[in-house]
Amino acid sequence: MSAVVTPTAPADAAPTTPAASAARGAGRGSGRRRSTTTSGPGSAVTRRPLPLTIVQYVLLALVLLLFVVPVYWLFSSAVKPESDIYAWPLRWLPSSLEWSNFAEAWRAAPFDRFFVNSIITTGVGTVLEMGCAILSAYAFAFVRFRFKKAVFVLVLGSLMLPGHVTLLVNYITVGELGWLNTYAGLILPGMGSAFAMFLVYQQMRQVPGELIDAALVDGAGHLRRMLTLVVPLCKPMILTGTLIVLIGKWNDFVWPLIVTSTADMRTLPIGLMFLPSQEGYTNWGSILAGTVMVGLPMLVVFFVAQKRIMGGIAAGALKG
């Protein structure tokens, strides 16, 4: 007699009813959802309270207004009719665009000559000042010489002195050399800058000494090491210092006013002095238009260079 073997279901098998399948699917789905939302202690995200976030955005908006409103008022008033400038309550939008304000400002003074003088003094002065800053920063960072610390402290001590303290001494020196009312008198006294030197020096200190030693083994001298190794590594900070020096020289007012005596040697900030009084009254439209002409080049330079500068500073801050 042969036995009939019937297949039996496993003991743990569940009935495959639609309700059971739906229940199992719901359980697996909730498990997956729980696994995606569960995070470890290190990856937990803390959210700021909503009132604190609102306060922060309000403060940010107030600070933004403090900077944006004066700039907007300057640029909008430069193209306003005179009646809009004196109107009360304030008119934030010009009733008509008066581009003639720029023409009047340009004709009121030899602004073409002022632009040439400012470009020459700013360009040459910035190159000389940053060149001296890079050379002196490299010497303090990598060259050994006697009384190095004493000289460094002396140079940094000059940062504590107001600029007007050396004004009279520089004027007497320039006068004795016969450089009054010349480009040499405008440019050369500003070559030394402890601020620019210290800015570049702080960045050069982060250059690994192993790279300098390797270049020394390869036979590279100080000049070659500085130009091919140190300066490229410090380029972001050098660019930042260059921008700061550039803006400072472009906006310099006191020294060019003292050392020059004729209109053909004046610079743009002094050129604005020719605008306030015309025919017995103050023409604020032309004054503001002239101010825009003076300040616009530096605004363009800043907005063009800010991405590279901020990226370089951030990259330097992340270095160990």
Image (cartoon, rainbow, N blue to C red):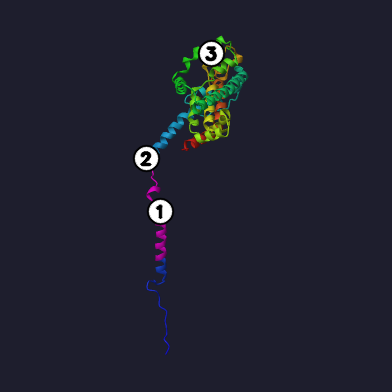
Magenta-colored span: 23-47
Query: Foreground residue, 139 or 66?
Result: 139
Which mark's residue is nearer the viewer, 2 or 3? Answer: 3
- Mark 2 lies on residue: 51
Check residue 43 for magenta coloring: yes
Total count of labels: 3
Crowd around label 2: few <14 · some 14–19 · many ≥20 (10 Å): few
Q: Is residue 80 above or below residue 308?
A: above
- Mark 3 lies on residue: 258
Q: Is residue 190 visible?
A: yes
Quadrant assignment, res 273: top right
Which amino acid type is marked by label 2? Pro
Residue furthest out toward the top: 176
Magenta stretch, main secondary structure, is helix
Q: CA distance from mark 1 to mark 3?
A: 70 Å
Q: CA distance from mark 2 to mark 3?
A: 54 Å
Query: Which of marks 3 and 2 precedes in the sequence?
Result: 2
- Mark 1 lies on residue: 37
Which mark's residue is nearer the viewer, 1 or 2? Answer: 1
Residue 240 lies, in percent from the top left, at 52, 30
Which residue: 38% across, 42% down?
A: 50
- SS type, badge 3: helix
Q: Residue 293 bears which disc, if any? A: none
Q: CA distance from mark 1 to mark 2?
A: 26 Å
Quadrant assignment, res 228: top right
Q: Is residue 130 above or below residue 32?
A: above
Check residue 177 for magenta coloring: no
- SS type, badge 1: helix
Query: Which of marks 2 and 1 precedes in the sequence?
Result: 1
